[in-house]
Amino acid sequence: MLEGGQPEKPAILVLSAGGALESEVLAGIEEEGVPYLVERVAPDGDSDAQRLARRAAARSSLDVGVGIDADGGVAILHDKLPDGVEGLSAAQPATPREGRVAGHNAARIVVGVPLMDVPR
């Protein structure tokens, strides 16, 4: 809840260590018309994309979290799916196209439409 008792706006939470990949992921989410919030995290060895995505999903009002680590890895997780979904993580470092598709897929989980194939 926000100050004054107002509920939080529904949004995908993105925990990011920054980098060029972040803008691609956010563009993919935006192109699907789903709101997002970005929180920057300090890059460290304990903040891989999977862990960041798990933390983000647990805190997201839409139960969908995206993690972007300092090595260029990206992961998407839904809080209700503890093992995640195969194919929703990109190898490190992810290409800009993989980052954009990851953003699309994070938003598509929320909207409930078929996911895009991750380019290989």
Image (cartoon, helix red, strand yellow):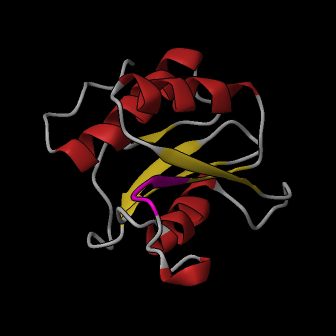
Predominant SS of the magenta segment:
loop
The residue segment tinted magenta is 9-13
Q: Is residue 3 left or right of residue 54?
A: right
x, y percentage for residue 35?
44, 43
x, y percentage for residue 33?
35, 31
Q: Is residue 108 left or right of residue 69?
A: left
Seen at 35% across and 61% down, the residue is: 62
In the rendered structure, does residue 57 fall within the stretch colored magenta? no
Q: Is residue 49 left or right of residue 29?
A: right
x, y percentage for residue 61?
41, 67
Which residue is more in the foreground, 54 or 94? 54
Q: Is residue 58 left or right of residue 115?
A: right
In the rendered structure, does residue 12 fall within the stretch colored magenta? yes
Quarter occupied by residue 57: bottom left
Above or below, 16 against 79 in this view is: above
Above or below, 111 against 67 in this view is: above
Seen at 66% across and 57% down, the residue is: 48
Rendered-image quadrant of the C terminus:
top left
Quarter occupied by residue 88: top left
Which residue is more in the foreground, 10 or 43? 10
x, y percentage for residue 94?
58, 28
Number of labelled discs?
Answer: 0
